[in-house]
Image: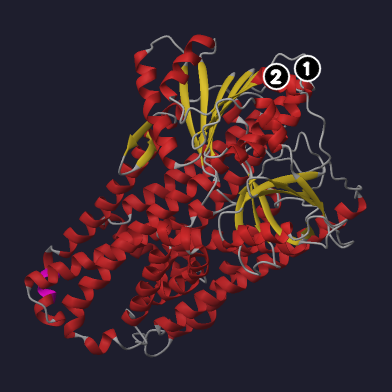
Amino acid sequence: MASASLLFILKMLIILLFAGWVSLWILKPTQLWTRKWKQAEQRAAKTFFSYNGLDFVVYALPVIALAVIVSIYTELTSRSNSRKPRSSFSAVSNTIIVNRLTGILSVAEAVSVCLFVALLTWIFYRRFSSDLVGKGMMMPVKSLKLNGWQFKFSRAATRCGLLAEACLALLFLPVLRILSVFRYIGVQFESSVKYHVWLGTAMIFFATVHGTCTWFIWGINHLDEMWRWQRTGRIYLAGEIGLVTGLVIWITSLPWIRRKKFEVFYYTHHLYVVFVVFFLFHAGDRRFYTVLPVIFLYGIDKLVRIVQSRSESTCVLSARVFPCKAVELTLPKDPRLKYNPTSIVFMKIPSISRFQWHCFSLSSSSMVEEHTMSIIIKAEGWWTGSLYEKIQAELGGSKAGPIPVAIEGPYGPASLNILRYESLLLVAGGSGITPFLSILQEIVYADQNKRGNRLPAEAELIYVTKNSQDVSLLQPLFRQLAKKSTSQLRLRVRLFVTQERRNNLTLRQLTNEISRTELVRFETKQSDRPIGGVENSGSMAVIVWCCSVVFLFLTCVFNVVFVQPAMKGKDKKKKIPSTVTDSFLLCSFVAALGCGIMVAILLRLRRVKKDDDEKEKLSSSDEMDEMDENALEENCEINFTGRPCFKDIFSELTKDRRSSEIGVLVCGPETMKESVASSLPKLNRALPGQPRFDFHSLTFTL
C-alpha cells in the first residue's frame, strides 16, 4: 500500500499542474501574455528548441504529465480497500439538478459547465476587443477590402474559431480509457462520454459559425484563396474540408442515428483522423500545440489498447442462453486480474464484424470467479442479434466450435467508494441490471465468507422490467442467495413486471419457468490465453515519456536542420512554407506514436512471458447449483402491479433504515433515472434528521 506522504505529493502535483494549465488559458488572450510570449520565443529561437520546442514544453508537456500522474495516483489508491469518509467534493457531486432540457446534472457538473462558458466568454471578449482597438480598424480599408461592419463580423467569426479550438483542446479527455483523468474524481468512462458529446457539439457549433461567416463575409471577395492550397499563411481549403468532416461526424452521432444505424455512427466516427489533420493545416503548428496534448494522449491510449487486444486473443468458454433472448458469455481470466464492480469491457468478435467494438458491463465479480469473467448480452440490434443467432445454432450439440474474441479492458472505478455506504438501494431497468449483478455478487460473497467489513451491511434491489422472462437475468444472483445461510447482511430483491398481469403467479413458479436455460460449451485453442487486463500505470508512464522524448527530439532536429539555417541565410524574410512545418509536426507525431507502439509491444511480450511461466489451468464454473427456493422467497418478492412508486419506496426506507446515508444507484432508461432523481431532493428536504439519499447514475450503453 502506498504511503500517505507519497499520495499527498502526487495530489499536490495534480492540483498544481491543473491550476497551471487553467491559468495558461486565462492569461493567453491578454496583451501581457502576448508580449511576454513573443520575448520568450525570440530567446528560444537562438537555441535548438526554437518556438515549436517551447510550445510543446509549455502547452503540451504539463497536460501529459498531469494524465500520467493521475494514472499513477488512481492505481495506488485503488489498492486500498478501506471505506473512505464522505468528502466535500462527493457531497457537491451527489447534489443533483433535474431538468427536462439537460436531464440529470450534479451541482459539480453545472458549476463546471458555467466555469467553462465563462472561460470561453473571456477568450472571445479579450480577443475581439483587441481587434477593435488602435490600428486594427484601419485594416479593412487598406488590405482586407471590407467596410467597418464586415470587418467586425469577420473578426467575430475568427474568434469563434478560437472557441472551437478551446473545445477541441478538451474533446478527447473524456474518452481516454487507460489514461483517464476523470477516474481521479470518481467518474467512469461510460459516464464521462456525455462530456465528449457536449464538447463535440459546442466545437461544431463554433466551427460552423466561424466557417460560414468567414465564407460569406470575407471569402466572397477572396474566392481564389478559398479554393487554393497556399504555401504560406492560412490554408482555407483545409479548414473547409475539416468543417465538412466534423459535420459528418456530428450528424451521424445524433442519438436516433446512433441507435438505429450504429454501424454508420461507428465507421464515420473514425473520420476524426481526417478532421485533426486538416485542422492542423488550417490553424498552423503554433495553434495546434494547444490541442496537441489531448490528441497525443488519445493516440497513445488507442495504440496501447490495440496492442492489448491483439496480444490477448481468446475464445468464449461457454454461453448460457436465457429465455429473454439474452446470453451470458463466460471468458477466461487471469486469476491475478482483479476488477471492481460496475467495470466494463470492450469486445470484438471477428466472425461477426472484423472492426466493430461494443461496450458491455461485467456481470461477474472477480472476488467470486477467479478464473473467468461473465458478460450478459441481450439481442437488441444487428450485432447482438447475430451473436444470439450464432449461439442458438449451436444448441443441442456436444461441444461447439470455437468463437474467437478480442477484449479491451476491463475498465472500472479506481476504488469502491460507491460501496462506502452502510446501506444501498439499487434501482435497475431492463438491461441495466448487469452492473448491479457484479455489485450484489461481491457483497453477498464477502458476507458469506466473512471477507472484510468495508461493504454495505444492507442492500435492496428494485428491478423493473416489461416481461417476466427478463427476471431470468437474475439467476447468477439467485444462485448465491439460495446458498445464503447465517449472515449479518440484509438483502432484499423486489421485482416489478410492468406489461404482464399474472397476479396469481408465485415467485417459486416464476423461478421454475425462468430456470429453463441452456448451456453451450465451446472448443478453445491451445494458443488462447486468459485476459490479463490493461497496462499498469508504471508501464503507461514509460510509454508516454518515451513518446514525448522522441517527439521533442525530432522537433529539435527539425529546428537545427531547417529552421536555424533559414534564419541565418541571406534572405531572412523568406519563411519556411507552413505546409512543410505542419507536415513535419505530423510526421514527428506519427514517429513518436510508432516508438510508443514498440515500447508497448516489448512490455506486453515481457508480461506474456511472465504469465506463461506462472500459467495455471483454467476452469469454467458454469454448472447450475441447486437453489433453495425457500431461501429465495424469504428475500424476494414479485409484483405485477405496474411501475413502482419510488416516493413510497423511499418513505419505507427512511422508517426501516438506521444508516445516516443511503446510496441510491440507478441504471436504466433516462426516464426512470429522472423519476428517481427528481424525488430524492424533495425527500431529503422534507425529512430533516432522516437518512440522506445520495444519488448515483450508472450508464450501461454508450
Is residue 127 placed above or below 70 in the rendered structure? below
Tag 2 secondary structure: loop
Q: Residues in magenta?
A: 135-139
**Residue 171 lies in magenta, yes or no?**
no
Q: Provide residue 216's location: percent of width, then percent of height.
A: 18, 77
The residue carrying mark 1 is: 485
Q: Nearer the viewer, mark 2 or mark 1?
A: 1
Spatial separation of the CA atoms under disc 2 and disc 1: 18 Å
Q: Quadrant of residue 672?
A: top left
Main secondary structure found in the magenta portion: helix
Amino acid identity at mark 2: Asn
Query: Is residue 80 in view from this perspective?
Result: no
Q: Residue at x 49, y 58 (%)?
A: 294
The one nearer the camera, 321 or 525, is 321
Q: Provide residue 421's location: percent of width, then percent of height.
A: 57, 22
Is residue 688 placed above or below 236 in the rendered structure? above
443 left or right, relative to 427: right
Image quadrant containing the N terminus: top right
675 left or right, relative to 147: right
Q: Quadrant of residue 545?
A: bottom right
Tag 1 secondary structure: loop
Query: Is residue 412 in view from this perspective?
Result: yes
Mark 2 or 1, nearer chain start: 2
Q: Which mark is residue 453?
A: 2
Q: Provide residue 48's location: percent of width, then percent of height.
A: 52, 72
Q: Residue at x 53, y 47 (%)?
A: 190
The one nearer the camera, 370 or 360, is 360
Is residue 85 placed above or below 259 in the rendered structure? above
Amino acid identity at mark 1: Ser
**Residue 136 lies in magenta, yes or no?**
yes
Q: Residue at x 61, y 73 (%)?
A: 591
